[in-house]
Image (cartoon, grey):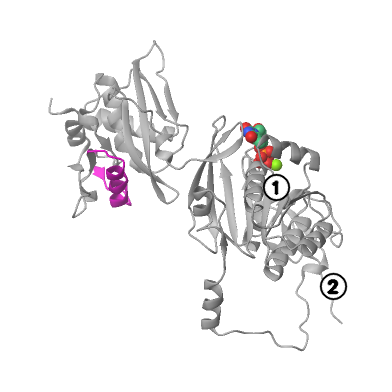
Amino acid sequence: MARTQALYVCRACGGEALKWQGQCAHCKQWDSLEAVTASRRPREHGGSAAAAVALDEGTAAGAGMARLSFGMTELDRVFGGGLVGGSATLLGGEPGIGKSTLLLQVAAALARQHPIVYASGEESVAQIGLRARRLGLASAQLALVSEHSLDAILALALERQPALLVIDSIQTMQLAATESAAGSAAQLRECTAALVRHAKTGGAAVMIVGHVTKDGSIAGPKLLEHLVDTVLYFESDAGSRYRLLRATKNRFGPVNELGFFAMGETGLREVRNPSAIFLSRRPEPVAGSVVMVARDGGRALLIEVQALVDRGAAGAPRRVAQGVDANRLSMLLAILNRHADLSLVEHDVFVNLVGGIEITETATDLPLCLALASSLRGRALQASAVAFGELGLTGEVRPVAHGEERLRELAKLGYQRVILPRENVPRAAPAGLELQPVATIGEALAAAFGAR
Ligand code: TYD
Ligand code: MG
């Protein structure tokens, strides 16, 4: 006789344990283990063998797998070229960021050609309808359901055979066979597993909303990532109307793809040329502003780095960094002081990346230093030069990854002069781009402002 054994899963990481413990052995989170019902344990094998196909047949079937276009190129790109039939996607993000808005728009767009079911456990049909009206969406092929019972939703999906089933959100769903509250680790796992099973057997694509809190820790997406094919995160800066959609896992496309959207009065609109957001277009170059080419989420992005250096009042000078690491800024100020004879110890220093973007890569070092020097001297960079590069503690300019791609993006957008690390100079520079390779911060300042 098989022994019934309880199984415990961690709410934070999805790790399993055979007996309850105060701390998860996998992620070391305290008090995060929860009992899971027996249904999820592997069933005993019956007599019949599994069906197998030859690889060639498999590749042929894969080629025939249609991708549905969302009608938004930014979205299609994040998915690796559109939505794959029978795929399961998890869309994570903080409450209020726009997950429901995005999926309602997506559902309505796809519903022009395919039957779609949009199931919400958070809003009534009237509320969803109100939102749809505000977004200017209308579609008879889009079936709205307000329901907490996933059994009922799956039954409806079986009946309607939609091309896409949207679940908003997984935290509000409940399976009758799983005896715990909605939002518990057991329900989250069982509901997601049931949805994935539905996608794999019925062929409908499934999109699941999962809320995450600021620290990304609440029971939910983290626990479910390994169950689904694609994991997307919707991000934004506080107060910014721009939204970034990032693919952190994708069985059908590249990871770390990034899509840009703007939230407006009538919902989310794709931003095709994100570089334009992060540059404040000005006819004349001004002091304290340097354009850099950063790389985020698999694409090169032009960003304007701004610095304001001001002789501060008596007392400790202020150091304010928006979009860049404050410790990195302190390091750069020390490098400028020591290796470029630019002392800012008595100055208030403010730096900012235009458009509210946050960049963690070290390629911001050089443009940031140039912007600081430019503000201090009250002079713009010569010939609107663009810059990128890392700085070392000895004042050396170090190469960064994806140099050629950055140069291509610059050339594409019509920039003419770039100050870059010597090791990043490619064998053949893109046409129309004048390169100014530098090896030290001193050389970079000379290239930027001319010899003093
Ligand atoms: P929502 O999609 O409900 O967020 P989530 O499902 O991730 O919790 O988005 C809600 C926010 O979006 C809310 O603050 C209002 C704003 N919003 C707009 O700015 N414009 C719009 O057209 C819509 C529908 C919402
Ligand atoms: Mg919502």
Q: Is 178 situated above or below 296?
A: below
Secondary structure beneath label 2: loop
Residue 233 in picture, x, y percent from top left: 58, 48
Q: Amino acid at mark 1?
A: Ser
- Reading the image, the residue beneath label 2 is 4
Residue 113 in picture, x, y percent from top left: 64, 56
Residue at 69 percent across and 65 percent down: it is: 199
Residue 107 in picture, x, y percent from top left: 66, 50
Q: Amino acid at mark 2?
A: Thr
Secondary structure beneath label 1: loop
Q: Is 389 situated above or below 59?
A: above
Residue 227 in picture, x, y percent from top left: 65, 63
Q: Residues within 10 Å of mark 2 (few under 14, many from 20)?
A: few
Label number found at residue 83: none
Specify whether residue 95 is in view: no
Specify whether residue 426 is in view: yes
Spatial separation of the CA atoms under disc 1 and disc 2: 49 Å
Q: Quadrant of residue 21?
A: bottom right
Q: Residues within 10 Å of mark 1 (few under 14, many from 20)?
A: some
Point out the stretch of residues depicted in magenta.
395-416
Q: Is 373 situated above or below 90?
A: above
In front of the other: 140 or 260: 140
Q: Is residue 381 magenta?
A: no
Which numbered disc, 1 or 2, marks the residue that appears first in the sequence? 2
Ligand 2 in which quarter = top right
Relative horizontal placement of residue 121, taking residue 283 as reference (left or right): right
Label number found at residue 139: 1
